[in-house]
Image: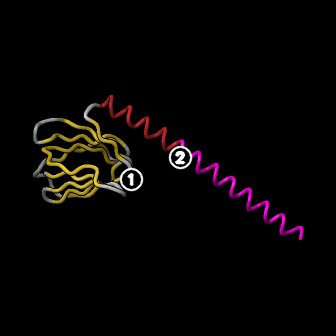
């Protein structure tokens, strides 16, 4: 099977695999090459795949969609982090969340400043 993981800005992963395990709203499931075609919504969690060299690798995914069609498995998600060990993956996710939290804080601060400036300008218009 060919596993492709698509992010909005790039293709994160494009590799041959023997097995894929992921989690949907109704629980975990596994895919092998002769599995029936289907589409499912993924929940945030760990997607595990076994390479053709029998190496197990891990992919932390945000919400997304998984499509199995023939020998192709495609995952489309907003965010994903690839790692070969769960401990390494946990550290990478924590760093990514920290960056996202800082970005969101800066965005909220900028929005508050814009709102305050807008209110101030409306008040000035009312005085004239």
Tell me if 103 is positioned left or right of 63 in this view. right
Q: Position of residue 24 (x, y in %)?
A: 32, 48
Q: How many residues crowd mark 1 within 10 Å: few (<14), some (14–19), many (20+)?
A: few
Instruction: Pick the residue in front: 117 or 54.
Output: 117
Instruction: Pick the residue in front: 37 or 74.
Output: 74
Q: Position of residue 44 (x, y in %)?
A: 38, 45
Residue 65, visible in the rendered structure: no
Numbered range of the magenta stretch: 102-128
Pointers 2 and 1 in contact (C-beta within 8 Å): no
Instruction: Find residue 27 and name its label.
Output: none
Q: Position of residue 78 (x, y in %)?
A: 38, 53
**In the rendered image, which quarter is residue 36 located in?**
bottom left
**In the rendered image, which quarter is residue 61 located in?**
top left
Residue 114: within the magenta? yes
Query: Which residue is rendered at x = 25% and y = 34% of the image?
Result: 84
Instruction: Pick the residue in front: 99 or 57.
Output: 99
Residue 10: within the magenta? no
Pointer 1: what residue? 78
Query: Which residue is rendered at x = 38% and y = 31% of the image?
Result: 91
Pointer 2: what residue? 103
Q: Main secondary structure of the magenta part?
A: helix
Say what secondary structure mark 2 lies in: helix
């Amino acid at each position: 099977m060919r596993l492709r993981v698509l992010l909005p800005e790039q293709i994160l992963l494009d590799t041959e695999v023997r097995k894929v395990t992921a989690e949907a709203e109704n629980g975990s499931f596994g895919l092998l090459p002769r599995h029936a075609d289907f589409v499912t919504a993924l929940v945030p969690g760990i997607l595990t795949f076994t390479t053709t060299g029998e190496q197990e690798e891990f992919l932390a995914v945000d919400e997304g969609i998984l499509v199995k069609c023939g020998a192709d498995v495609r995952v489309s998600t907003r965010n994903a982090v690839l790692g070969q060990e769960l401990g390494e993956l946990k550290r990478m996710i924590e760093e990514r969340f920290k960056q996202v939290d800082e970005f969101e804080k800066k965005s909220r601060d900028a929005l508050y400043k814009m709102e305050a400036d807008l209110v101030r300008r409306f008040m000035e218009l009312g005085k004239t």
